[in-house]
Image (cartoon, rainbow, N blue to C red):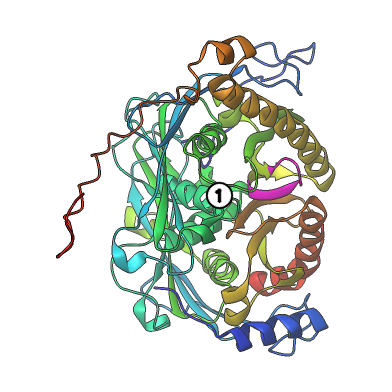
Amino acid sequence: MEDVEHIEKKMKLIDENGLRLDGRKPEDMRPIRMEVGVLKRADGSAYIEWGGNKVLAAVYGPREAHPRHLQDPTKALVQCRYNMAPFSVTERKRPGPDRRSVEISKVISEAFDSVVFSEQFPRASVDIFIEILQADAGTRCAGLTAASIALADAGIPMRDLVASCAVGKIDGVVCLDLRKEEDNYGDADMPVAMIPRTGEVLLLQMDGHLTLDEFDKAFGMVKDAIGGIYEMQKDALRKRYAVTAEEFSDLPEQAPPERRAPPEREAPPEMPPEDGEVPQ
Amino acid sequence: MTELISELQRERVYRLAASGTRSDGRTPEEVRPLTIEKNYIKNAEGSARVKLGNTDVLVGVKVELGVPYPDTPDSGVLSTGAELIPMASPYFESGPPRPDAIEIARVVDRGIREAHTIDFKKLCITPKEKVWICFVDMHVLDYDGNLFDAASYGAMSALTCTKVPASKIGKEDYPLPIQHYPVSVTAAKIRDVIVIDPNRQEEQIADARLTIATDENGDIRAMQKGLRGSFSYEEISRVIGLALKASEVIRTKIKA
């Protein structure tokens, strides 16, 4: 569990040179790598490695919302399921939703709800699945960041991408992107998700202890970090979809750049001739 | 099932909030009258019935013997649950806790836990083997908006009058060791207007919600943003300021 444990401080998290356990400076993030379009069946998908986190996100939809009584005649539902694999954490996690993942699923769903142009798809649902394969603190931010590019991969119309990162406090110092030991033994953790272009905060949670000045500092740091993640998201999407001039000239005329195999469609059935009309 | 509100009503509640006098006559920065009745349930080790305006929440604390978590072998345990029972609203249904109730319980829990409200070390009997476990159960009896704060005030009030039943193990009962008094204050954003302690109608038309738990030093202990709308940094700072301002009177009432 990354957010509720009350553990007494036993560990020194910042050394005499001001460096963290993994040699990072307070404002450094862990290495991040993301890839779009990693699953065949899903309408959109993405994989992210963020420090020790390995997270897959898949998007289905817009599709008919089930059960039907949940359908909204004015807009699509945006539903997220955040789930941790039993082997993703040190102690095996019992499979299925626990209270923590129910809460995280709820706040992530709400974060995406105002970004997706859901009014375009009445009675439908856009289903987002986030699987934490390996956890090392900051999984909800990694999941949200991946889900955002998976939504783009699925072609879901959105106002913008959503990018997310956490900031916290360890040994009294405000630090970006805590890893597991820092989260467990640190003083505060604050995951934030924003629309990077406008600065609108879509997800904000905090636990621990921050003075007002520390909050201001933390917010400034995480805002800058989110700007950087936004660029990485766009790069990942470009890498998936960009076509170079050479590639383009090699393409047979009229054929769209290959994306993934289009769904097989049956040829339209021939219309039976109407009565009295003789086929020529 | 969600409660519907007519467009006319929606517009009226918004306009009133924007005008500075809300649908129930309050200013945007005013909390509804809060009454706290402690020791309401005799069979509970601690309890409180809290009314925040017409929102009515009963919280009971049961303290039982149990085994500590392996990673905190010398600490007692806090376990928090919320039930939105069908008597409290025509739109609450029976059954296992749904995401709404889980979020309320977890946000209340976070505010209390992160402020180090309870001295858990004093709840240890035998390290690794036996500790006291505090079960805080929040029962919503009447829903008229802002369950996050009503439940939190109820939980804090109940904990402040909780007795650890040490006579069960041949010692003397003692009051639950409370070291801090965090206070949660929730704001709702309705289009461009921010009000604190939203009533039911305001909650129905709110675009976003922000809960801030602060301690007696004016520091932040927990935050939770909810609903689909967004907050700007300036708005968050404003809500923090409003929460700090409102928290003092509430803290005095919880301590009393």
Question: In front here: A154 or A278?
Answer: A278
Residue B81 seen in the figure: no
Please say if A253 is above or below B16: above
Q: How many marks?
A: 1
Q: Does dot 1 land on a helix, a strand or a loop?
A: helix
Where in the figure is residue B152, as x and y percent of width and height?
57, 65
How busy is the neighbourhood of tag 1: few (under 14 within 10 Å), some, or many (20 plus)? many
Question: In front here: B63 or A273?
Answer: A273
- Residue at image x 61%, y 87%? B9
Quadrant where the N terminus of chain B sits is: bottom left
Q: Chain of mark 1?
A: A
Magenta stretch prevailing secondary structure: strand
Where in the figure is residue A200, as x and y percent of width and height?
72, 50
Please say if A203 is above or below A264: below
Give the residue at the far front of this rendering.
A280
Q: Amino acid at mark 1?
A: Phe
Please say if A148 is above or below A56: below
Is A280 positioned to the left or the right of B242 in the image?
Answer: left
Is B179 positioned to the left or the right of A51 in the image?
Answer: right
The residue carrying mark 1 is A112
Q: Which residues are magenta?
A: A195-205
Residue A256 on the magenta segment: no
Q: State the image quarter where residue A172 is shown.
A: top right
- Residue at image x 58%, y 33%? A8
Where in the figure is residue A34, as x and y percent of width and height?
55, 22
- Residue at image x 37%, y 59%? B167
Where in the figure is residue B67, as x and y percent of width and height?
34, 41
Q: State the image quarter where residue A262 is shown.
A: top left
Residue A202 on the magenta segment: yes
Residue A278 seen in the figure: yes
